[in-house]
Image (spheres, rainbow, N blue to C red):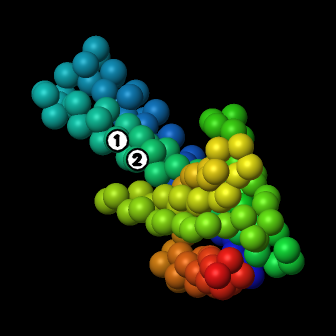
Amino acid sequence: MRLSNRNKASVYNFVHTLLMMLAIFGIAAFLLNEYRFKAVGKESYILLIVPLILLAVFHLNGRQIFEYDSDGEALNFKNRNIIPFVDRPLHDEFPKYKLIGYEIVRIFFVKRLYITISSKNSGSTILKYEISYLSQKEVNDLKLSLNKVVKTNKEKND
């Protein structure tokens, strides 16, 4: 099964650009109000705080693009940001038989996928992916596919 939200990258770029412009205009309006016009009192801080909070929430949600491929004998996970220099993209590929389990954690508007795989060195390793930007249908499809692999692995080990 293949799952990808790469086709939504242009929407995420647009939202990011809009938030950046909103933040820049907010800072400019705040500075003009403070040093030149003095039209708005203490409420001028809203021009500064709201766009910066929205931009922070956008970035704290994590990497926007998530790709999953379970075709063949390997599981392939890719997780990257729309802005290449913000953080390193994640790319992991491992055989299906190494998958021990998974967990999806939701905290407010943030969703994370934790994959546990068997490892020769330490017994097991946990890989973390940000899936906040996946729709509920995509998350359900991902769960279905991972459940299938975990179930197959448990049957082989028993």
Q: Is residue 9 visible?
A: no
Q: Which residue is mark 2?
A: 57
Against 145, residue 7 (above or below) is above
Q: Nearer the viewer, residue 100 or 134?
A: 100
Label at residue 149: none
Does 128 sit left or right of 24 as displayed?
right
Residue contact between numbered discs 2 and 1, judged by CB atoms under 8 Å: yes
Q: Residue furthest left?
A: 41
Secondary structure state at the residue bearing disc 1: helix
Q: Residue at x 46, y 51 (%)?
A: 61
Residue 119 x/y as whole percent: 70, 52
Q: Nearer the viewer, residue 138 or 122?
A: 122
Against 145, residue 12 (above or below) is above
> Alpha carbon of mark 2 to alpha carbon of mark 1: how far?
6 Å
Residue 144 x/y as whole percent: 58, 84
Against 132, residue 90 (above or below) is above
Q: Is residue 152 visible?
A: yes
Residue 55 x/y as whole percent: 44, 43
| Neighbour tally class for label 1: few under 14, some 14-19, many 20 plus, Cα within 10 Å | few
Residue 111 x/y as whole percent: 45, 61
Q: Which residue is mark 1?
A: 53
Q: Residue at x 75, y 54 (%)?
A: 92
Q: Nearer the viewer, residue 70 or 57?
A: 70
The amino acid sitting under disc 1 is Ile
